[in-house]
Amino acid sequence: MKFNSKGFTLIEIIVVMVLIAFASSLVFINIGKSGRMKRNRLFAGNMINLCKKARLRAINECMPACLKISPTLRQCWISFKDTPFKGAADGEEAVSIEDQADENTSVLNIPENMRIKGSGIRCDDNNIHYICFYADGSSGGGELTLTSEEDGFAFTFRVDMLTGSIRKIDTEQLEF
């Protein structure tokens, strides 16, 4: 009995289909991960831009401007007001962040997977962390580290106290 060898067997076709399915699933997993990393990098860039905007506004307006970060509300904003954040006190209506933020500043929402750790950052009684920038270009200084453990993302930047300059720090330098 002679077999005709001009085609593929069913088993060969199934093996090829399984390999294609496996390879495409790896591609989709990596695409999803790179999308989250892109969002994390975008948020880090927005944080740096908010710091730069606060510094420039302080210099241009000749008055202190503060980058404020609320870990409980998961939001960041710029405020010219020196008063601390006002939450709801007994019998008082809560003042929203939008009311306290400068009218030309949008509120930046912190992604759920993002953790912000500060070093040398001030904190008021309402657990609002802030870095103030002054009219002479200086600042309160400090260091912010943005991390997302599920994505393996880490980004650190430092605000210089004397010059108010904002500089990215390589995360490899932080590990001792």
Image: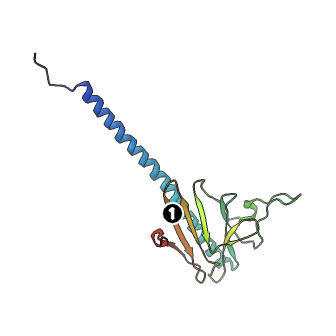
Report the number of numbered marks. 1
Identify the coloring. Answer: rainbow
Residue 6 versus residue 171: which sits nearer the camera?
171
Furthest residue toward top: 1
In which quadrant is the N terminus drawn? top left
Q: Quadrant of residue 90?
A: bottom right
Q: Is residue 85 left or right of residue 114?
A: right
Asked if residue 77 can be seen in this view, the reply is yes
Image point (56%, 68%), residue name: 48
The amino acid pointed to by label 1 is Ala
| Image: 58 above or below 71 | below
Name, please, the residue furthest toward the left.
1
Farthest residue to the right: give it: 91
Residue 150 lies left or right of residue 20; in this view the side is right
Mark 1 is surrounded, within 10 Å at the Cα level, by few (under 14), some (14 to 19) or many (20 or more) other residues, namely: some
Name the residue rendered at 42%, 44% in the picture: 28
User: Where is 96 relative to 84, above or below?
Assistant: above
Against 171, is 138 above or below? Answer: below
The image position of residue 6, as x and y in percent, is: 15, 25
Residue 10 lies, in percent from the top left, at 26, 24
Q: Residue 108 at what x, y percent from top left?
A: 63, 60
Q: Which residue is mark 1?
A: 154
Q: Is residue 105 visible?
A: no
In the foreground, 147 or 96: 147
**Which sits in the foreground, 84 or 108?**
84
45 relative position to 92: left or right: left
At mark 1, the secondary structure is strand
Q: Is residue 21 left or right of residue 166?
A: left
Q: Residue at x 26, y 27 (%)?
A: 11
